[in-house]
Image (cartoon, grey):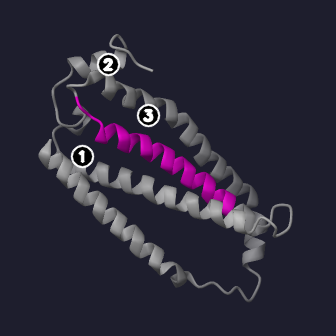
Amino acid sequence: MTSNTSFATQAVASGPMTSAPPSFDGHGWLVIANLVTMTSATLIGVMAITYLVQDGWRHRQDGRGLSPARIWRYTGLLFATGITLRCGVEAASLWAWDPRLPAITARFLVAKRLVDPVAISFGLSGLALFVLSLPGMLEQLRKEPLPLTVWQARPILHRIGWLVLLSAVAAIGVVSTR
């Protein structure tokens, strides 16, 4: 993907020997904040994708066509995939940052730019599906009674909280030991 003569490799090699990309301007707290959010968002996105795919597989026999549940699932899947891809390559480039290994660091920087259009395409597709399905979904959601219990997913929220906490501990550890 990149070689020792690539622009990205040259930029990393000739740049300052910083413990994080120079765009963080030496602010360790900002590196930690980005590591936590990007890592957590990636892992939460993977959890969402896994759940939505498994749920779709379990309910694959629930009729043909685009039911509100199927559209809802596809929309979530598109958004989760876009977030996971974008945040995943950003997290990887931050975790892998090492100006002493410019070719490896440059590979992650180039990967970010290669994945960005794909990730944005997933997000825009999710947004398009949301907008296209909005009138029909609103009509379905306005029908009474609509039994909706939000708090049944509370255990998932606890797992996400632990995931964010562990990401924060790891980020603090890596930034303070670089």
N-terminal of the two: label 3 or label 2?
2
Q: Is residue 13 left or right of residue 91?
A: left
Q: Amino acid at mark 3?
A: Lys
Indicate whether residue 172 is drawn in magenta: no
| Residue 105 locus on image (x, y percent) | 31, 28
Q: Which residue is mark 1?
A: 31
Residue situated furthest bottom in the rendering: 145
Q: Answer yes or no: do the residues labelled 3 and 2 have beta carbons within 8 Å? A: no
Q: Is residue 152 left or right of residue 131?
A: left
Q: Is residue 73 left or right of residue 173?
A: right
| Residue 1 locus on image (x, y percent) | 45, 21
Q: Is residue 157 left or right of residue 120?
A: left
| Residue 13 locus on image (x, y percent) | 23, 19
Q: Amino acid at mark 2?
A: Thr
Q: CA distance from mark 1 to mark 3?
A: 17 Å
Dot label at residue 9: 2
Label 2: how many Cα within 10 Å (few below 14, some 14–19, many 20+): many
Q: CA distance from mark 3 to mark 2?
A: 14 Å
Label 1: how many Cα within 10 Å (few below 14, some 14–19, many 20+): many
Label 3: how many Cα within 10 Å (few below 14, some 14–19, many 20+): many
N-terminal of the two: label 1 or label 3?
1
| Residue 111 locus on image (x, y percent) | 44, 31
Q: Secondary structure at mark 1?
A: helix
Q: Quadrant of the C terminus?
A: top left
Rendered position, 137 above or below 143 = above
Residue situated furthest left in the rendering: 177
Q: Which residues are magenta?
A: 73-98
Dot label at residue 112: 3
N-terminal of the two: label 1 or label 2?
2
Q: Amino acid at mark 1?
A: Val
Q: Secondary structure at mark 3?
A: helix
